[in-house]
Each structure stands twice: as C-alpha cells, then as structure tokens.
Amino acid sequence: MTLTRFVTKNAFRNKRRSVLTVLSVGVSLLLLTFMMTVWNGFYIDKGSPESTRRLVTRHRVSLTNPLPAFYREKIRAVPGVAGIIPNSWFGGLYID
C-alpha cells in the first residue's frame, strides 16, 4: 500500500471529520487574509512624496497637549528645516 492511497483511504473514512477539517482550514485562511488586508490598510503609507520630508513631533502624554514653545527655536535651528507649524490638523475625511 502506497502512502498516497493510505492517506486518501483514511481521509474519506470519516466524511464529516474530513469536511470539518477542510472547512476549518478554509475559515482560518479567510481570517488570515482579512486580518492581513486590515493591517495593510492601516499601516501602508500611500502618501505623497512631499510627506516624506515632514517630521511630526508631539507631546508624549497626549495629542491635545502642545509641546513647549522653546522647542520651536530648537527645531528651527536644525539645518535643513524649512518651516515650523505649531499646530496643524491633518484634514482627514471620514465619509466622502
């Protein structure tokens, strides 16, 4: 008896178990695909090339707490800094 014949014989011996096994593997692959799609949707950047030259700094406690004002001068003193905006909202859309 070959290995493939042995496997197929035992796989179809209990049809309910075989169907449940195939369904469970299918559902797990479906969930994995869905979760990877959600992950890619959240974390893959599709921004413009201009956004790669932008640095965002924020308060370590909360987005609503502003950074101290003396940080503006420290950041402005860094070579290559073109401008500083103390508060800028991203202008995202919830529903188009």
Image (cartoon, grey):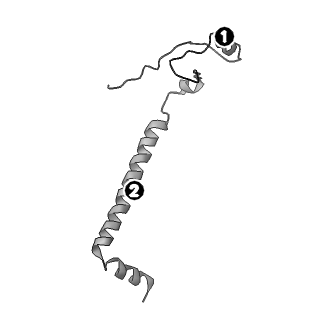
Residue at 58% x, 21% y is: 59
Residue 85, label in figure: none
Q: Does residue 60 sit above or below 30 in this rendering?
A: above
Within 10 Å of disc 2 (Cα), the crowding (few <14, some 14-19, many 20+) is few
Residue 70, label in figure: 1
Give the mark toward the camera: 2 or 1.
1
Residue 29, label in figure: 2
Disc 1 residue type?
A: Phe
Residue at 39% x, 56% y is: 29
Q: Dividing the picture into quarters, in which one does residue 77 lie? A: top right
Q: Residue 12 at x, y = what percent?
A: 31, 78
Residue at 30% x, 68% y is: 19
**How far separated are the C-alphas under marks 2 and 1?**
52 Å
Q: Does residue 77 sit above or below 44 in this rendering?
A: above
Labelled pair 2, 1 in contact (Cβ < 8 Å) = no
Residue at 66% x, 10% y is: 70
Q: Dividing the picture into quarters, in which one does residue 79 lie? A: top right
Disc 2 residue type?
A: Leu
Q: What element carries label 2?
A: helix
Q: What element carries label 1?
A: helix
Q: Residue 60 at x, y = what percent?
A: 59, 24
Quadrant of image for the C terminus: top left
Q: Does residue 41 sit above or below 52 in this rendering?
A: below
